[in-house]
Image (cartoon, rainbow, N blue to C red):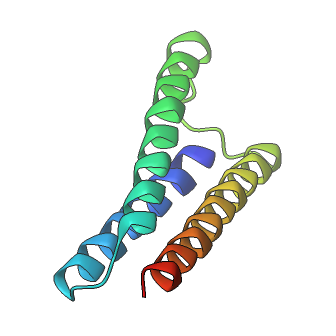
Amino acid sequence: MCELMTIGAAILFTALAAFARRSGRPARALGTTALVFWGAALMWSVDCVHAYLEEGELFDLSRDDARLGALILAAGLALFAALRVREGAAARRAA
């Protein structure tokens, strides 16, 4: 479940970063968060393949895995919030 959640978050943040760049807004925090989620998705996909080779299940859809996915999403959103605050402070200093 955490694999699917991180892939979804990576796709969402990638799309948001692309939209922000097209509209001329700064997208550094969005892009960085997208890369973090893509890294997590890659890590979890390796774990899923290993579990499939060892146990025969590709995805773990248990409640504990969903909680882990929620924790990963919360950490990524906290990172995004911190980066946005830092971007805002830098923009205010520059103005």
Question: At 49% from the left edge and 50% from the top edge, which residue is drawn?
Answer: 37
Comparing 30 with 11, the one in front is 30
The percent coordinates of residue 59 (x first, y second) are: 57, 38
In which quadrant is the C terminus drawn?
Answer: bottom left
Q: Is residue 69 left or right of residue 20?
A: right
The percent coordinates of residue 92 (x first, y second) are: 51, 85
Q: Is residue 44 left or right of residue 65?
A: left
Question: At 37% from the left edge and 61% from the top edge, which residue is drawn?
Answer: 31
Q: Is residue 73 left or right of residue 7?
A: right
Comparing 74 with 47, the one in front is 74
**Above or below 92: residue 39:** above
Question: At 75% from the left edge and 53% from the top edge, which residue is drawn?
Answer: 71
The residue positioned farthest toward the top in the image shown = 54
Question: At 51% from the left edge and 79% from the top edge, which residue is drawn?
Answer: 93
The percent coordinates of residue 72 (x first, y second) are: 68, 51
Comparing 71 with 82, the one in front is 82
Comparing 64 with 84, the one in front is 84
**Above or below 38: residue 81:** below
**Above or below 7: residue 31:** below
Q: Is residue 1 visible?
A: no
The residue positioned farthest toward the left in the image shown = 22
The percent coordinates of residue 87 (x first, y second) are: 50, 72
**Above or below 64: residue 82:** below
Q: Is residue 79 visible?
A: yes
